[in-house]
Amino acid sequence: MTPIILLASFLVYTFLIFYVARLTTRKANNESYFLGNRNSPWYVVSYGMIGASLSGVTFMSVPGLVQAEQFSYLIMVFGFMSGYIVVSFVLLPLYYRLNLTSIYSYLHERFGLVSYKTGSLFFIISRLIGSSFRLFLVVSVLQLFVFDAWNVPSIVTAAFIMGFILLYSFHGGIKTIVWTDTLQTTFMLAAVLITIAIVAAELNLGFTEMLSAIHAEGFTQMFVMDVDSPRFFLKQFFAGMFITIVMTGLDQDMMQKNLSCRNLGDARKNMLTFGAILIPVNLLFLILGAVLWMYANAHGLTFANNSDELFPTLAIQYLGLAAGLTFFFGLVAAAYSSADGTLTALTTTFVVDFLGVKRKEGFTEQRVKSLRYKVHIGFAVVMMLIMLLYGAIHNEAILSMLFTIAGYTYGPLLGLFAFGLFTKRKVLDKWVPLVAVLAPAISFLLNVYSQELFAGYRFGFELLIINGLLAFMGLYILSILRNFQDRKQ
């Protein structure tokens, strides 16, 4: 495949996205941007969230991990489903009852202004880093297979992609993204199914023969029984559960789409349907990884240094035009789904939580629109800079790094919401930032020295639970100090 063909494919897909954006931005206002006028069909939101949840990380990293980790990732996916149940019956009712635009407004009502802004800030940090990493994975492939041929610098590639994302998400916000996510999900799933069929044909395998061969190669192993392993199945399950609670239920990007549904019942149907569909969808990605590794092994190809390169390299360089184009369309869909909703959620959080457009008087419709335009552009620039920085230093699969970072940055949010929901205690609001910093710092030290401290035990993604528990304990200490202060007064 030539760079010209790939670039043309990119522009065709971009045209489709802009067409959808144009249809959805007619008569759009600030309420359309923030909550889609609370008129999004739940089944459209549910289907579109598949692509937003998967993004480029699942698209490329999950197939690459199969050689080393087999199907053990599926245990984490079952944990995801448990997390979606918690979100549906614990968090969504809270958000709808309080009629929230930003979910972190709950922290203002429960603890105070400092806690509120601390929660918002940790979301901003988490989403900026996570979404920039996701987008970097996709941009790096575009750079390698398209723009390197013309000696285009990576900073220009990043700006090029971000510019398109910025333009189509600029006006419509969540109202546009609910529908563009639907298109992106379709292309990503089609890419997986078509590629599986192409590789199976290359290996002369029918459907049942393919499944038998995957099992015979040992790829279907799911349960890791070694307690000290980061992939021990119970660690995987509970880590998946809590990752979903924080990266969906406590994440403005994902919740903003849910809050655009007409009512709580629709939002709950959306969440439970979405969670159930993710199980077979992730299984498809694991099957894809298995057949790709079977093909690579049969042809003596190795990807030991970077397993993320497995899918793009085979699709574009070895499997023919149909597989290359299929992969590329899925890749571009993943690129857009990685960043469009994030830009809208970050803008919403900053404008609502930090600038206070919902709390303060004097913010006219036009002034709010002007502010969100500037913030939207600002976050796009910051994401591009983070991508470039990561490009200079990355050395491991992004899926693993993404969940590791989430363990540190989402832990304080988990502690804050858990303490707010499961206790009625008040805290010393001004000291909450200290707890939010100390909890991940202590978690980091525990992770670094875990083998020395815990007789060889190594933390996996369950570090998020430890982090949240430390934050919860810190807030409990602040509540004791608050009671002491109140009695003293």
Image (cartoon, rainbow, N blue to C red):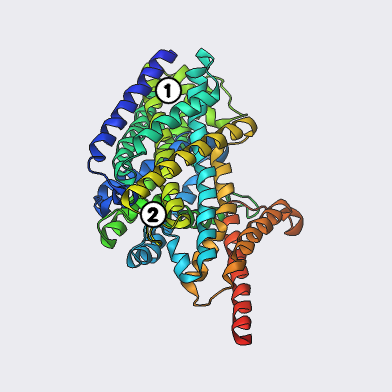
Q: Residue at x 52, y 59 (%)?
A: 117
Residue 386 in the image: above or below residue 446: above
Secondary element at image label 1: loop
- Mark 2 and 1 residues: CB-CB less than 8 Å, in contact? no
Instruction: Point out the image quarter for the N terminus.
Output: top left
Earlier in the chain: of badge 2 and badge 1, it is: 1
* Residue type at the position of mark 1: Leu
324 relative to 408 in the view: left or right: left
Q: Residue at x 55, y 47 (%)?
A: 403
Who is closer to the viewer here, 180 or 169? 169
Residue 95 in the image: above or below residue 61: below
Q: Residue at x 37, y 50 (%)?
A: 368
208 relative to 391 in the view: left or right: left
Q: Quadrant of residue 54?
A: top left
- Whether residue 36 is visible, yes or no, is yes
Residue 247, position as x, y percentages in the image: 47, 52
Residue 169, position as x, y percentages in the image: 36, 38
Residue 388, position as x, y percentages in the image: 57, 31
Assess disc 1: are there few (<14), some (14-19) or many (≥20) residues with their C-alpha within 10 Å of its C-alpha: some
Work out which residue is located at the far right of the displayed protein and give it: 452
- Whether residue 294 is visible, yes or no, is no
Assess disc 2: are there few (<14), some (14-19) or many (≥20) residues with their C-alpha within 10 Å of its C-alpha: many
Q: Residue at x 59, y 76 (%)?
A: 479
Residue 344, position as x, y percentages in the image: 40, 45
Secondary element at image label 2: helix
- Find disc 1 in the rendering and name its residue: 203
Instruction: Point out the image quarter for the C terminus.
Output: bottom right
- Find disc 2 in the rendering and name its residue: 255
243 relative to 35 in the view: left or right: right
Who is closer to the viewer here, 201 or 401? 401
The numbered dot on residue 307 is: none
* Residue type at the position of mark 2: Met
